[in-house]
Image: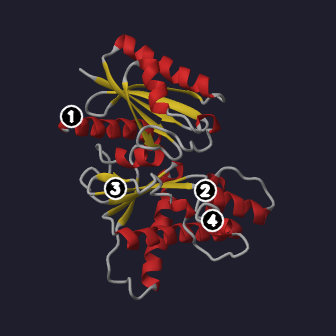
Amino acid sequence: MHYYVGVDIGGSSIKIGLLDESGVIQDKESFSTPKDKTTILDDIAQTIGNYQQKYEIEAVGLSVPGIVEENGYLTTAGAIKALYGINIKEEIGKRTDLFVHVENDANAASIAEKWGGVAQDVANYISLVIGTGIGGCLVVNNEIYRGAHARSGEFGWMLLDDNQDDLNLSTMNLQAATVGGLLRIYNLKSGEKINDARVIYKRAEDGEYLAQTVLAKFHRKLAQGILNVAVSFDPELVVVGGGISANKTFLNDLQLAYQQLQEEHSALVDMGFPKIVPAQFGNDAGIIGAVYSLKITLAKKANN
């Protein structure tokens, strides 16, 4: 049997998995993301090399934050400054002597859902990964839509307000439409330094007015952004990922805010909008999506 290695490179950790041909993870491990470029690349290559000693590895799929060019060049790499301006496809390829495919992390998490996930029978959908900021992806006719400069799906920079003094504060990323924005606004109003959104949800459940008020704004702002994307692209489904997507209260309240916005706009009431559903693969989405994107690329190469 042939196997594939999926690598999900994040700002705090790097997750690496061994997948079989059907996308099932057979083995995985993780380690803290090193600070310098050489150590990052060498540690990834060493882990892949360990798998090569035991299994017949077909190819490697990488999931990386930031702007990823088609040839594997990283214009940016999110919080991983050491990887800015390198061709990571070439760097890992020469260290492992394997074919390497590179995908943006939000794209990888999104396309993973077509490989046995919640979007496996859906041709057109949008995906949002909600964390400190918001990443996203458009899947059109079963393929990732990348845009003219590989920057599509940056929903976090959508403007929700008109703050002429500082437009950055008007975006989804810095409004209360992200986990980072939620924490920022709650801490600003409470004078505390909470760093876990679950604390705010628990306080809201216990009846704290401030927590309830800030969460209501969070759900509404996020619903606004989703509605804007939905009316622009007419998807069949909206997939929400990130750690908070596992919170049932969050998902229920987001659905309610989304429905309320539609009811408030008479032109939208009878249009019928896509459902919002949680992503299925959680922390494994990057690994799975990197390999699925790789397999799509290999299939295209074989047909050409």
Question: Which residue position holds label 2?
Answer: 179
**Measured from the top left, where is residue 78 in percent x and y?**
59, 45
Asked if residue 147 shows in the view, the reply is yes
Mark 2 residue type: Val
Are discs 4 and 3 less than 8 Å apart at CB? no
- Between residues 278 and 173, which one lies in front from this camera angle? 173
Whichever of callouts 2 and 1 sits on the residue coming sooner in the sequence is 2
Whichever of callouts 4 and 3 sits on the residue coming sooner in the sequence is 3
Point 46% across, 57% down: residue: 153
Instruction: Give the numbered dot on residue 286.
Output: none
Question: Which residue position holds label 1?
Answer: 302
Quarter in which the N terminus is drawn: top left
Mark 1 residue type: Ala
Are discs 2 and 1 less than 8 Å apart at CB? no
Question: Which residue position holds label 4?
Answer: 176
Quarter in which the C terminus is drawn: top left
**Measured from the top left, where is residue 109 in percent x and y?**
42, 46
Question: Which residue position holds label 3?
Answer: 139
CA gap, disc 2 to disc 1? 42 Å
Quadrant housing residue 236: bottom left
Judge depth for marks 4 and 1 and give the one in front. 1
Point 45% across, 57% down: residue: 152
Q: Residues within 10 Å of mark 4 (few under 14, many from 20)?
A: many
Judge depth for marks 2 and 3 and give the one in front. 3
CA gap, disc 2 to disc 4? 7 Å
Judge depth for marks 1 and 3 and give the one in front. 1
Mark 4 residue type: Ala
Whichever of callouts 2 and 3 sits on the residue coming sooner in the sequence is 3
Mark 3 residue type: Val
Residue lying furthest bottom in this view? 266
Judge depth for marks 4 and 3 and give the one in front. 3
